[in-house]
Amino acid sequence: MLASSGAWADELAGAVAVAAPEQITALDPVYRQPEQTQPAATQLDSAAPEPVKPGPSLGIDLEQVQDLASIVDDARKQAQAEYLAEKLRQSPQTVQRYVELAWKEASRRVGLDPELLIAIIQKESVFRPKVQSSYGAQGLMQVVRRWHREKLHASESLFDPVVNIRVGTDILEEYLESADGDLSRALAKYSGNARGYAKTVIDESRKLAQVADTAAAEVAISPGLFDPASAQHAG
């Protein structure tokens, strides 16, 4: 026989009234029932959080990470130098010197890939640091001194690869800024609006990046790279 709805409601309300404090206590550790109330000072002491203990070390050796990054970058540069030396039939050691300089210069800039500088050098001078055009463009990136005197010290020579790449990169950044970051427009201006220049340079820079990425992937999966002990035994 079923109880009336009123009696059932009263019974449910009583059960809730009894259970509520216990449920609140379980959900909220700070909750205190009236008979458990403590003086304020005691409450503060008991509620004070325990000192945070330092978490376990992740075991990351930053020097090792930097060494690995350096190994991968070296593989990228070497692969690019070998690719260019074979393509242009030049000495890998000679080409690698200019590849290294391009990487070093790009590392000083924001958002500028070394492959772009290398592609410009290839297009402009085929890695001949002493070349000069009839128009007066000099060196690896074919810089015209009379147009960019403010970027050079009086004693500097554009036949110096370090100086030439620095000034050529300054010019490229200046053109990129004036073109609102449009690489094709900046390269067109750099070349004096030579037909097809921008596409050739961009395509070659992408190929260089692909060569570098392939070399980096091969190094990354080589046995012993991430295990110094294994590498030592292997050597």
Image (cartoon, grey):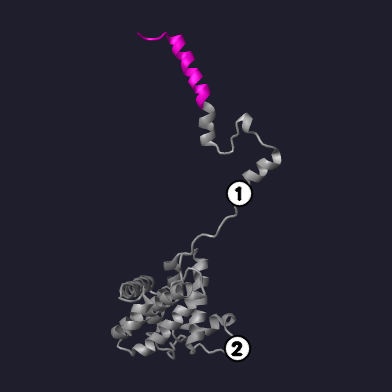
The label shown at residue 20 is none
Secondary structure of the residue carrying numbered label 2 = loop
Residue 138's x, y, as percent? 47, 87
Residue 208's x, y, as percent? 35, 75
Q: Quadrant of the N terminus?
A: top left
* Label 2, label 1: how far apart the Cα atoms are: 67 Å
**Residue 204 within the segment the image draws in magenta:** no
The residue closer to the viewer here, 189 or 59, is 59
Note whether 91 is above or below 192 in the view shown: below
The segment highlighted magenta reads 1-19
Residue 190's x, y, as percent? 46, 75
Q: Nearer the viewer, mark 2 or mark 1?
A: 1
Asked if residue 141 shows in the view, the reply is: no
The residue closer to the viewer here, 124 or 3, is 3
The label shown at residue 49 is 1
Q: Residue furthest front?
A: 35
The residue that mark 2 highlights is 154
**Quarter-of-image position of residue 223:** bottom left
